[in-house]
Each structure stands twice: as structure tokens, then as C-alpha cells.
Amino acid sequence: MSNDTAKEKVVIFDTTLRDGEQSPGISLDVGEKLEIAGQLARLGVDYIEAGFPIASQGDFDAVHAIASNVRGPVICGLSRTSYKDIDRCWEAIEPAEKRRIHTFIATSPTHMEHKLKMTPEQVLAEAASAVGRAREYTDDVEFSPEDASRSDFDFMCDVLQAAVDNGAGTLNIPDTVGYATPHEWAERIKLIRERVEGEYIISTHCHNDLGLAVANSLAAVVSGARQVECTINGIGERAGNAAMEEIVMTLRTRPDIYPNLEVGIETEELARSSRLVSRLTGYPVQYNKAVVGRNAFAHESGIHQHGVLNERTTYEIMDPSVVGQDGSKLVLGKHSGRAAFKDALSKMGLDIQGDALNSAFTRFKELADRKVQLSDADLEALVAEELGSSIENSYELVTLDVKGGNANTPKAEVVLESDGVQIKAESEGDGMVDAACTAIKKATGIEGRLTDYTVMSVTGGVDALADVALSFESADGLKVSGRGLSTDVVEASARAFISALNKVVRVRNSGENPQEIDRPGHIG
């Protein structure tokens, strides 16, 4: 005999298409709802709450289309307790292979008095009658006492007992306004189980007004809830619902805290589901969103990057591929270290060592202070620039100060360093680039003219790196090229010009052929 303890299933009840769509500004058409429902089926949710059929003809059509076309999950419709609502709900979900009616009525004093304008006795009778009506259509009926966290406990339990006595198989306890905290919510779920008699599954539906929706849902699971109502990306009314991806991955990642529990979710589909819902609803996913956010597995700190390079689990408690993410991302920015920089270059096929690596890394840190994140294209351009200038430089740019505009003549002041000595020069020009290059010529004493000048954007965005390539012919006929990179076009131009003048010096000192200098060489 096996000693393994049988696992209990936690049912995932997805309400992205009902409660999620009630988010302000979201309005999905039938085709969009069908697309999301199809993805939810691939994800492996147990229930799809497809909508509120009585709310509008469009909502009815969407629920009916999902019921007619989506197979796998149970298709559920929401209804109030009136017979008209329940009948309309059944009409919408009838084509589904598996169907559920979810009916609800508020049980808190403030809702009964100000919204329903009903007495507790009327609410109790209405709940019992509604469940009975729903059971005439299907054996799978769910009942919810709306605003359960602010309801009188004894009265709410009387309503729940009436629902069970009339055939409800699932009792969903909703924290409708996100008022509960994990400890009290766990206690309330536990006491309901002890108080309400019969065979039923306890469900929990938590809102995020205090940022506790996921925590409250998991607290309910600890106390015996075996259905969790949730949405993709946590979308929903006001601050939203419990995020499905966070609940599922918490149960998967921490079996020591939630032992012998399982969910039927294909976790590799979580990221894809998140992207689809975000695209169709127009609700962006925050970068640092747990599990599915673009930064969920991204690392910029040098210490973290070094750890992840040695062993992923040093800073990741989940494997990105398990949730459908592309993998760990070492984001290169000003906090990155040499190990991550070298690793990124290696993955791009750029194997540089020694002084070339040191020079490129120094330049990388300088650029990273100006640009939040450097892409592969940025790194390729940076390394190309450094490899072309790290052989032997007679001149290095120390500072560059330019002034321009259409009201004054552009001026530039440069400070170069040569053999440990700083050289300062200034000049005017037709533009800021011309002024900078003229000042550099004064500082170096090298005369000649630009024969070609090209500037390109390495990447998109206002902080894109400018990649300047230019050709220069010295007064004695030497033809060389130079390349410079910076977030500032004028600085990139100055760096390219200095690169070209350094080549002139090398040619004069060594008798090298300029064509050999400009020819691409082995990176090493």
C-alpha cells in the first residue's frame, strides 16, 4: 500500500469575464470574451463565470456563445434571487456540457437596509426560494451571501443553512468590499463549516481594497475552503479581485504550508493568459506584478545577477518557464556588475577579455547612469566602439560643454587628456557638432576635414543611444574613420571625431595602413 496521503483539489473558479469585466472602463464584446474563455479552458480552470446574463443583451449573448463553444470547464452564470434572473441565467448557459447557476443576495445590515430595503426575514426567504428555483434546472448551484465580511454571523449562517437545505452544493463566502483581514477571515470560514450542516463545498471570493485579497483567499483555504474565486491579473471592481496566478503559484510553491492540496491549472499558460487579458481589456500589468509581471524574474542588482548566474534559486523561488515566462532576465543598468555584463556579451557572441572588457565595462557604467536600461543593440554598439578605440589612444575626452540655439553662435569647450596632461580648447561653429569638432582639432593640433558623417539611433525612445560614424581626411592625406556612442548626439559626434584623430596619430607613429586599422578584426 502507498503511504502517500491523497491530495485534495482546490477548485479554481475564474470570474475574469464577470467580476473582472466589471472593472471601470472594461467592455468586452462577444468575440473578445470567447477568446479569453478559450484561453481559460487551455489554462485548465475548473469553472468559468462567463457573465451576468440578465444585465444586458450583450452579456447574455456572450454567456450563451461561451456555453455553446467552450468545452472543458463548467460554464457558470450569475443571477440575483428573482426567478426572472434565474430563468434568464439558465437560458444563457443551457448549451454548455457542464453548467452552474450562481445566485446571491446581500446579508449585511447596510445592504439589506439601504440597497435591498428588505428585512432579514425576507432575505432568508428569498435565498431559500432562489436556490430551489435554480435546482429545478441543474444540480450544480452556488449561493453567495453578499458582503459576508460585514454580515451578522448568526444571521448569515441561517441564510447559508437555508441555501444548503434547498440544494446549494457550493457556499461562496464573499468579502465583497475587501474589509476582512486574513486571521478573522480564516476564523469565519472555520466557524461556518462548524455551524452550517450538510454536504457542500466552501468557496471564498475576496476583493483587494486593502491589498489582502490573495492573503485572505489563502487563509480561507487553510480553514477548509476548497474553491477559490479569482481573476487573471487580479482585475475586478475597485481595487480588483484575488489574482489567480498568485494563488495557484503559492499553493504550488509552498506545499509545506499548504500540504496535500493540488490545483488543475496548466501553469505554463499563466503568462499567456495574463498578456491576453491585458491586451483585450486595455488594463496594463504592472511591471513588478507577481508571477506574470515583466520584472517578476528580472534582476539588475549586481549582487543578485552574480547569484543568479551561479545558481538561479539564489534569488528565484519559481522557475520562470513553469509560469510561461521566457526565463530569468539580467537587466543591464547602473546597478549591474561586471559578471552580468560579461555574461550578456557572451550570450551575444562577444567574447572580450582583459583591458578591452575593462574599458567596455567602464563605458557601460557611464552610459547606464544616463539610460535606465541598455538593450542588446546598445551593448553591441558600445562594444564595437570600445574595440575600435582600446588599442592605443593618444587622446581621451574628459569634458565637453556646448551651447547652441538660434539666437547665439554655437560654442564648444573641450578638455582632452593626453599622456596624463589635460588640454583645454574652445571654438565656435556652424552648429554644436561643428563647434565641438573644431575645438577638438585645436586641442590636438591635427588639421583636416570631415568627408562623411552619419548618425543613427541604436534603439527607439527618447533615451536611445546615438551611434555616430564619420570619415576624416587629415591635411597630409591620411583617411580614417571614427565611431562614437552616447545618449547625446553632440557627445557621440565628439567621441567619433576623437576616435578618428587617434587613428591618425597611430598611423603617423607606426606607419600602419589606415585601411588595416578600419578593417573589422577578431574580437578577443
Image (tube, rainbow, N blue to C red):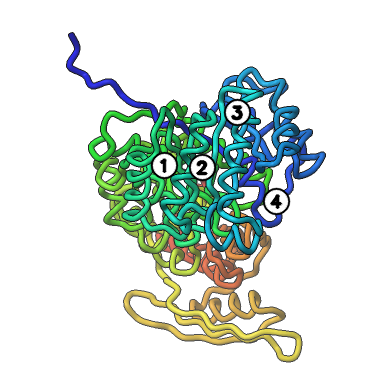
Per the rendering, the mark at residue 230 is 2
Q: Is mark 3 on a helix, strand or loop?
A: strand
User: What whole-number distance in Å separates the C-alpha atoms at marks 2 and 4?
Assistant: 17 Å
The answer to whether mark 1 and mark 4 are in CB contact below 8 A is no
Give the image location of residue 446, x and y in percent.
Answer: 53, 74
User: What whole-number distance in Å separates the C-alpha atoms at marks 1 and 2?
Assistant: 8 Å
The answer to whether mark 2 and mark 4 are in CB contact below 8 A is no
Residue 29 is at least partly visible in this image: yes
Residue 478 is at least partly visible in this image: no
Circle 1 residue: 247
Q: Which amino acid does label 4 sit on?
A: Ile
Question: Viewer-proximal residue, 106 or 57?
Answer: 106
Q: Which amino acid does label 2 sit on?
A: Cys
Circle 4 residue: 26
- Mark 2 or mark 3: which is in front? 3
Circle 3 residue: 100
